[in-house]
Image: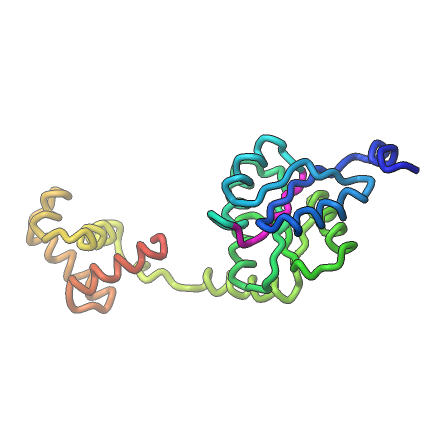
Amino acid sequence: MTGGGAKGARKQIRVFLVDDHEVVRRGVAALLETEDDMTVVGEAGTAEQALARIPVVLPDVAVLDVRLPGGSGVQVCREIRSDHPEIACLMLTSFADDDALYDAVMAGAAGYVLKQIHGADLVGAVRTVASGGSLLDSGSTGAMLERLRGAQAEPDPLAELTPQERQILDLIGEGMTNRQIGERLYLAEKTVKNYVSALLSKLDLKRRTQAAVLVAELRGRRY
């Protein structure tokens, strides 16, 4: 049976390859093209190229190297999945990195495999994510879920503040004085002072400069 005839016999899985090493791309392409249900529809060596080309060819699966010039496979995955959620992203990397796994899953990746994977297993991984399945190492996934649970369990440091106190805290973070805050919120300066005293007490802080530092830290965590 010829390769062309076989490819016409089954629904094709359209695959796009992203890796900065041409030898790796060619090797993976050669491997996938031997399968009668797979077609490599494009390649890219940088994040910029990937973001420009993938939306044009609209593959079923994008195989993405985690580390890329000018960005990362995780960034590409996040942007592609945001605009084209029907495209499954399979992350391919040389390193077992829990942080990269966490970031990839948060970006919407359906799978995460090491480059040391056997050829047959990589083919199976592509088929799995193309069919809507997930392919994540059970041990790594367990560690990631523990991290997620930890993040969800982390208490909100501002939970006890009222909406007005949160707003005043935010303005303190912008460096405003009580008078300026009062003018912004149409409150008497004395009223603002009372709010500031209350929020400092709730946050177990002694000075407004400490409150300003806290705001900066929270903004760094996308508060």
Which sits in the foreground, 192 or 88?
88
**Residue 160 vertical position relative to residue 82 in the rendered view, above or below:** below
Q: Position of residue 195 (x, y in %)?
A: 16, 56
Q: How is the image coloured?
A: rainbow
Q: Nearer the viewer, residue 111 or 177?
A: 111
* Residue depicted at 16% across the width and 63% down the height: 209
**On the picture, is 165 further left or further right than 40?**
left
- Residue 64 sits inside the magenta stretch: yes
The residue that appears at 19% across and 63% down in the rendered structure is: 200
Residue in view at x 75 percent, y 46 percent: 30
Up the image or down, 47 lies above or below 146; here it is above
Q: Give the quarter of the figure containing the N terminus.
A: top right
Q: Position of residue 20 (x, y in %)?
A: 57, 49
The answer to whether residue 159 is left or right of residue 145 is: left
Say whether residue 1 is left or right of residue 202. Answer: right
Let me know if residue 114 is in the magenta part. no
Which residue corresponds to the image point at 81% horizontal and 44% vertical from the top-left? 34
Q: Main secondary structure of the magenta part?
A: strand
Place of residue 190 in the rendered image (x, y in percent of width and height, measured from the top left): 6, 54
Residues shaded magenta: 60-68
